[in-house]
Amino acid sequence: MFWMKSYLYDEHETRLEEEWAVEKNLEMQGKTRKETGLEEFKEVEIRSTIVGLDIIITKAHFVKLLGLEDKGKIISDYKDNTYYRENIKKEMYIDLSLLGKSKWMNDCDYLQVYRIVI
């Protein structure tokens, strides 16, 4: 149920949220998120609702759950730079021709995160 109703709350989602607040009340044009009654954006979150309970998962949850260090590269930060994206893929996979297959991942940590996402 969680994953079926989940969505990614990121910078794009916050912009949509701001636009919706302005459409709803034109006096909010040019005001900060706090002034419009919206919560400040801190980090990317996975959000869902189960039985009326709002659930939020952040990177910190995965770090603690998997016992990892809070470091690494965020692939979406390199969306316009294919050189970095390709290097990140090379770091993650043994054989790039098998990209997307979990058993060909280099590091156990990558494999664990891949399985959680799936």
Image (cartoon, helix red, strand yellow):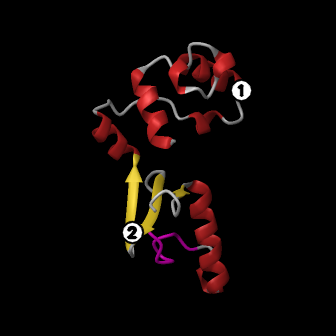
Residue 46 drawn at (x, y percent): 47, 55
Residue 29 visible (yes or no): no
11 w.r.t. 68: above or below: below
Q: Tell me which residue sits at (39%, 76%) in the image.
A: 52
The magenta stretch is: 31-40
Q: Which mark is residue 82?
A: 1
Within 10 Å of the Cα at label 1, are there few (<14), some (14-19), or many (20+) other Cα atoms?
few
Residue 35 visible (yes or no): yes
State which quadrant residue 15 falls in: bottom right
SS category of the residue bearing label 1: helix
Q: Which mark is residue 117?
A: none
Spatial distance from mark 2 to mark 1, Cα to Cα?
Answer: 36 Å
Residue 102 drawn at (x, y percent): 53, 26
Q: How many marks?
A: 2
Q: Which mark is residue 54?
A: 2
Horizontally, residue 33 falls left or right of residue 60, namely right
Name which residue type carries label 2: Asp
Residue 57 drawn at (x, y percent): 39, 53
Q: Tell me which residue sits at (48%, 76%) in the image.
A: 35
41 w.r.t. 98: above or below: below
The main secondary structure of the magenta stretch is loop
Within 10 Å of the Cα at label 2, are there few (<14), some (14-19), or many (20+) other Cα atoms?
few
Name which residue type carries label 1: Thr
Q: Nearer the viewer, residue 66 or 82?
A: 66
SS category of the residue bearing label 2: strand
40 w.r.t. 85: above or below: below
Q: Tell me which residue sits at (49%, 16%) in the image.
A: 106
Horizontally, residue 8 falls left or right of residue 40, namely right
Q: Nearer the viewer, residue 78 or 88?
A: 88
Q: Nearer the viewer, residue 104 or 81?
A: 104
